[in-house]
């Protein structure tokens, strides 16, 4: 059964002008915990990295990922993919 939704009444959009990602707090341990909870039997994500691979190398990539995430949030940028740069 297919339904057609009424799209004529959307709520007004909200602009966030002073939102800073620097307020996001996390630690190296938080990154490690997330990597430790990866389910190795799942499919690769958009980065084509298998969760099993990330899980197996988590002790080596936790701190570099922490630095990358922290820098990205502090500078309000998201690095581009190699083929997009």
Image: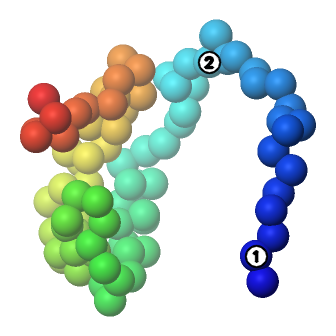
The residue labelled by disc 1 is 2
- In terms of secondary structure, where does tag 2 sit? loop
Q: CA distance from mark 2 to mark 1?
A: 39 Å
Residue at the location (19% across, 65% down)? 48
Residue 7 spot, x, y in % from top left: 81, 45
Count the labels in the image. Answer: 2
Q: Residue furthest top?
A: 17
Q: Quadrant of the N terminus?
A: bottom right
Residue at left 64%, top 10%? 17
In the figure, is residue 50 to the left or right of 10? Answer: left
* Mark 1, secondary structure of its residue: loop
Residue 39 is situated, as x and y percent measured from the top left of the image, at 38, 82
Badge 2, how many Cα within 10 Å: few under 14, some, many 20+?
A: few
Q: Which callout, 2 or 1, points at the residue further toward the start of the chain?
A: 1
* Mark sitting on residue 11: none
Q: Is residue 50 left or right of residue 82?
A: right
Residue positioned 67% across, 17% down in the render: 16
Q: Is residue 19 visible?
A: yes
Q: Is 55 positioned to the left or the right of 17 in the image?
A: left
Front in this rendered view, residue 3 or 69 = 3
Q: Would you identify the image quadrant in which residue 36 lies?
A: bottom left
Q: Position of residue 82 (x, y in %)?
A: 10, 39
Name of the residue lying farthest toward the bottom:
41
Residue at numbered disc 2: 19
Q: Position of residue 23 (x, y in %)?
A: 57, 25
Res 74 visible = no
């Amino acid at each position: 059964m297919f339904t057609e939704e009424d799209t004529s009444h959307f709520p007004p959009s909200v602009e966030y002008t002073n939102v800073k990602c620097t307020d996001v707090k996390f630690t190296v341990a938080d990154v490690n915990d997330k990597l430790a909870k990866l389910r190795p039997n799942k499919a690769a994500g958009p980065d084509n990295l298998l969760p099993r691979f990330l899980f197996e190398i988590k002790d080596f990539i936790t701190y570099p990922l922490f630095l990358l995430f922290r820098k990205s949030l502090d500078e309000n940028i998201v690095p581009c993919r190699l083929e997009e740069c």
